[in-house]
């Protein structure tokens, strides 16, 4: 069951204040004093040790480790300390300051991510964008104007943060006008804070230091601790702004009020003022997710349940799941679809329902897959809304282009092989497949008679993966079959 994050705030705060975790911070020389003070204000105890000769020793006895790339003289010490903290089970928080801006920072950030396992990575939009997709337009320590987070794009930042969380195993916190916090499964948007926070240096560094204190006090609840710390920073920033304005004072006074307020804000005020939204983000159809696209078939269950067989297939690495039921009554179909939707969520695999839009919408699926006739009759995209996955079948350049124009997120092309007598003879040639793939920009998955023996024939056809039914579900060991297919597809794709 999902935990109620707001309800966890009092415990998160009390754990920091009562346990007084020692937090080691290897941070930049610009804001080091502010970082030490905010750790103290939260109720924890700072140690700003950064000499490479001693950091491992320190990191193995503290409760939290923070590393901040602000001035880049301590990357070697960060690597040594990070490894020691990982070995000792101490949570590590990274602030990848200006990570995309220079070669030194790009390489330093890469090295840290390759060698240290982080509990939390906290950065502004440009920094996290660089780590997630390599294209953040960082020029200095502040986020670039074009990477600004707004009410129009914050969901996209949510997807990006979740993707990075899955890749790194860390909770990701993006700061800005709207803050985003994401784990592999859950994504939050937080609308607290004040514009004056970006008019003093180091509010981001201070937030990262605060995260070190909260993770140190709550090592088994990193997601809750992160949301609570980001919220404490934002709410304290708002109250500090009110106090600053009441005095008619400016930005440096604001900085003092901000640190003061971290020590003063209580859990009740925090809960009351926190503006937290949990985002329900479905899975997206990507090229990567087309590799082994499994379609269910209950014909070969052999006494096993569809749930168990599907779980075996997902655990083995299937990258996409479609439920296809031609004979079930609606009520049973819906039950089954709800169950598989939950299962697919657990494995972070996109899940669509074949042909039945009502069931797709009712069961919590990520989308629906339909044939050409369905898009002639009705506007499926309008029915399911802009966020759900729409898959459409096509077998010519013309129908593929039409599918894309109708709002498809991917195309299923087939039948690729004759399934009956002319075993393994292609009914769609690689040239025809390539023409289809070139005519559209969305992912393409091939379907029809594909199995582990004929996949290699599709090399050079431009497809992103294969969709199979019997090549998985008719096998005695569907999980093993999935693994073999995945390996062959990656070979076929030339990876
Ligand atoms: N315009 C704003 N409105 C509300 N909150 C803001 C605003 N700008 C910054 N903040 C808050 O300030 C804190 C720091 O975020 P910011 O994105 O400025 O970090 P940063 O760029 O890494 O800062 P630095 O590198 O100077 O330490 C976060 O808590 C964030 O929510
Ligand atoms: C201003 C500045 N320069 C390097 S680090 C730093 C603090 C904010 O990241
Ligand atoms: Mg910063």
Image (spheres, rainbow, N blue to C red):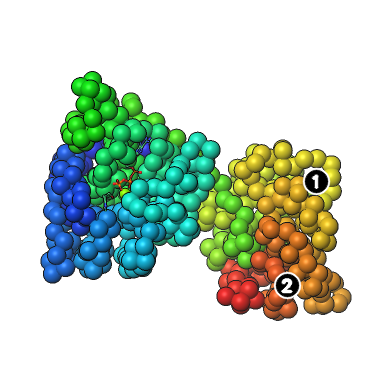
Q: Secondary structure at mark 1?
A: helix
Label 1, ligand 1: CB separation under 8 Å: no
Q: Are marks 1 and 2 in contact (CB under 8 Å)?
A: no
Determine the image quadrant of residue 441: bottom right
Q: Mark 2 = which residue?
A: 461
Residue 279 in the image, given as x and y percentages of width and height: 49, 40
Residue in front for this viewpoint, 453 or 383: 383
Residue lying furthest right in this view?
421
Relative height, residue 437 to residue 177 (above, below): below
Q: Residue at x 23, y 48 (%)?
A: 209
Q: Secondary structure at mark 2?
A: loop
N-term-proximal mark, 1 vs 2: 1
Give the side of residue 300 with respect to residue 60, left or right. Answer: right
Residue 53 in the image, given as x and y percentages of width and height: 13, 69
Determine the image quadrant of residue 245: top left
Residue in front for this viewpoint, 204 or 277: 204
Q: Mark 1 = which residue?
A: 375
Residue 154 in the image, given as x and y percentages of width and height: 49, 41
Residue 459 in the image, given as x and y percentages of width and height: 69, 76
Specify the quadrant that holds the N terminus: top left
Determine the image quadrant of residue 238: top left
Relative height, residue 198 to residue 410 (above, below): above
Residue in front for this viewpoint, 438 or 335: 438
Q: Residue at x 21, y 26 (%)?
A: 249
Given this view, does label 1 or label 2 mark the residue nearer the observer? 2
Give the side of residue 477 with respect to residue 252, left or right. Answer: right
Q: Residue at x 78, y 57 (%)?
A: 400
């Amino acid at each position: 069951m999902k935990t109620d994050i707001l309800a966890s705030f009092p415990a998160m705060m009390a754990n920091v204040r009562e346990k007084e975790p020692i937090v080691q911070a290897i941070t930049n020389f610009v804001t080091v004093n502010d970082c030490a003070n905010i750790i103290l204000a939260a109720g924890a105890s700072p140690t700003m040790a950064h000499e490479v000769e001693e950091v491992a020793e320190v990191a193995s006895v503290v409760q939290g480790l923070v590393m901040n790339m602000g001035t880049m003289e301590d990357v070697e010490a960060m690597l040594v300390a990070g490894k020691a903290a990982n070995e000792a089970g101490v949570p590590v928080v990274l602030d990848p300051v200006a990570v995309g801006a220079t070669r030194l920072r790009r390489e330093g950030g890469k090295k840290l991510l390759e060698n240290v396992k982080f509990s939390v990575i906290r950065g502004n939009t440009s920094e996290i964008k660089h780590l997630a997709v390599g294209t953040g337009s960082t020029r200095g320590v502040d986020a670039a104007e074009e990477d600004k987070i707004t009410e129009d794009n914050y969901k996209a930042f949510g997807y990006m943060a979740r993707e990075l969380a899955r890749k790194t195993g860390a909770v990701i916190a993006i700061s800005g006008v709207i803050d985003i916090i994401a784990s592999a499964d859950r994504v939050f948007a937080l609308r607290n804070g004040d514009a004056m926070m970006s008019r003093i240096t180091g509010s981001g560094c201070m937030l990262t230091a605060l995260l070190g204190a909260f993770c140190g006090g709550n090592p088994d609840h990193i997601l809750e601790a992160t949301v609570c710390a980001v919220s404490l920073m934002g709410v304290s920033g708002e109250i500090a702004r009110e106090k600053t304005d009441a005095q008619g004072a400016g930005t440096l006074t604001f900085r003092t009020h901000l640190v003061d307020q971290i020590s003063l804000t209580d859990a009740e005020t925090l809960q009351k003022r926190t503006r937290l939204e949990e985002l329900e983000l479905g899975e997206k159809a990507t090229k990567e997710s087309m590799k082994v696209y499994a379609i269910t078939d209950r014909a070969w269950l052999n006494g096993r349940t569809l749930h168990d067989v599907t779980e075996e297939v997902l655990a083995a690495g299937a990258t996409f799941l479609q439920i296809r039921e031609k004979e079930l009554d609606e009520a049973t179909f819906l039950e089954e679809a709800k169950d598989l939707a939950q299962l697919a969520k657990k494995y972070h695999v996109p899940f669509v329902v074949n042909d039945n839009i009502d069931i797709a919408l009712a069961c919590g699926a990520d989308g629906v897959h339909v044939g050409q006739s369905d898009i002639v009759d009705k506007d499926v995209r309008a029915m399911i809304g802009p966020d759900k996955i729409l898959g459409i079948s096509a077998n010519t350049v013309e129908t593929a282009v039409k599918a894309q124009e109708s709002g498809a997120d991917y195309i299923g092309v087939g039948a690729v092989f004759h399934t009956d007598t002319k075993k393994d003879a292609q009914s769609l040639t690689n040239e025809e497949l390539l023409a289809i793939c070139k005519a559209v920009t969305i992912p393409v998955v091939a379907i029809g008679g594909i199995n582990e023996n004929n996949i290699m024939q599709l090399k050079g056809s431009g497809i992103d993966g294969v969709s199979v039914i019997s090549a998985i579900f008719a096998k005695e060991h569907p999980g093993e079959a999935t693994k073999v297919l995945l390996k062959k597809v990656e070979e076929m794709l030339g990876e």
